[in-house]
Image: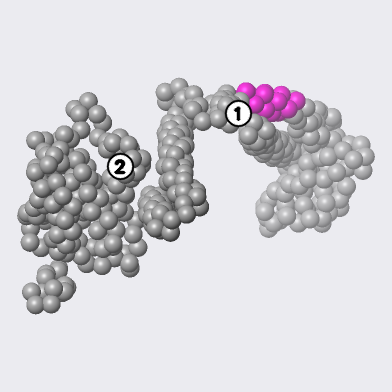
Amino acid sequence: MRTRARSVRWRLVLSATAVVAGLGVVLGVAVAGFLWAKGHERLRGFAEHEAEEIAHVVGDARTAAEVRSREEVFAGLFPEESVLGIAVWTPTGDPVYALGTPAPSPWPEGLREALLSGTAAGYLRLSEGKPAVRAALRVGPKESPRWVVLAVVDASGVGASVEEFATTFVPALLLLVSLCAAGSWWLVGRALEPVWSLTRDAARIAREGPGGRLEEPALGSELLELARFINAMLARVDESLGRLRRFASYAGHELRTPLARIRGEAERALRAGDPSAQQACLESVLEEVDGLRRLVDALLHLSREDPLDPEQEEPIDLATLADELCEQAAALGDERNNAVERTGAAELWVRGRRALLRSAIWNLLENALAASPEGAGVELALRRERDREAVLEVLDRGPGLPAETDPERFFLPFETARREGRGYGLGLALARSVARRHGGDLVYVRGERTCFRLVLPAATGFRARAASGSALA
């Protein structure tokens, strides 16, 4: 993880540096182009100005001899700084006068343009490779021009200015890019430090095992919420691992006891010579096997926490199911003179799996009968609440749970308040699991009587058929 974080650091630093370098190059090219364009624009203006001065000298000359007679005036204009040469041509391009080394060469295109528009300017490179700008100017009206004058000025200063700028700009850009790389490296390192801290904590938790937590970044950090989510997830994982360990421990303990009894009965049957005694041992073994099967079925059901498939659900009249179970439970209650009374709604529809709901309600009735004193009785009450909840309550007059006891404890697998050897402590856990898989819940309600309340989503659109007992939508 740290190597990967560092690679992210390198990518971010290289990206920032590349962006700064690219912007610097674009800026440098733009400035150099601007200097080049402005320099040539300035030189063109200077060349045109020099051509205008020559035009003033020859403006009133009528013949070539008059032009050449003004050589002293030309000598005052040339040589001048940056001026490489001057020339005077006839409108047909015949040279009249020229000064400069080398003398300005013929320029037919500039001559034609000057005769048509009055001025012409262009860039050229002299024979020795020196860059120059030349400007031609017409003397006289367009209909009857007398002369065309030319001035050539040195343009090497423009290139020198651009080179001077580049000589200064390139080292400055390299320094800027270096500072940007160093600053980006430091800033990205500071930004990634919380990530590295979380990585170190995660590595420590991986080494030390469950129970560790990530150190939360400072308040305001973007990673604070992530660290809290991860810590909450770790807490749930630790809780699940704890439950799994307890579940495995309890399951091993509960499975070991009936297996030991089965082994004991089998050994007793082998030693017994009387067929009737062997028969009794085998019957005892079958009872233990049935108990083990029920225990394994319960464990398998508890391991499934996914909701029911709607396609496997069916409409169930909870009142009819409760009546059937109360009749069966009454037989158990008769042994201790405990009547089972069914009160409340005569019809209450839900959707779900009939076998699962039967198992859940039976566990509640069985627990209530086991906890009730002799002659106290058990009540199963049904009602509809808020038009969307089906409520089933099983009440008894047993001792209930002490006030200081957390009721949630007895909804855990293998937790029981009965005397040792009477049940596995899975009834309430199974009943709650069934309720939650049906979208409901099972809770303990403190009061004058011990009450376990099963709440399920009520179904609408069903009514009992008096004659057949079936449901109509």
Report the span colored magenta: 171-188
Point out the residue furthest to the bottom here: 467
Q: Quadrant of residue 115?
A: bottom right
Q: Total label count?
A: 2
Contact, mark 1 vs mark 2 (Cβ under 8 Å): no
Magenta span: predominant SS is: helix
Callout 2 amino acid? Arg
Pointer 2: what residue? Answer: 422
Q: Position of residue 356 (x, y in %)?
A: 29, 58
Q: Position of residue 104 (x, y in %)?
A: 87, 43
Of residues 180 and 4, which is closer to you in this image?
Answer: 4
Q: Position of residue 54 (x, y in %)?
A: 76, 38
Of residues 419 and 4, which is closer to you in this image?
Answer: 419
Side of 112 where 245 appears, left or right: left
Give yes or no for residue 284 being in the magenta stretch: no
**Alpha-carbon neighbours of circle 1 within 10 Å: few (<14), some, or many (≥20)?**
few
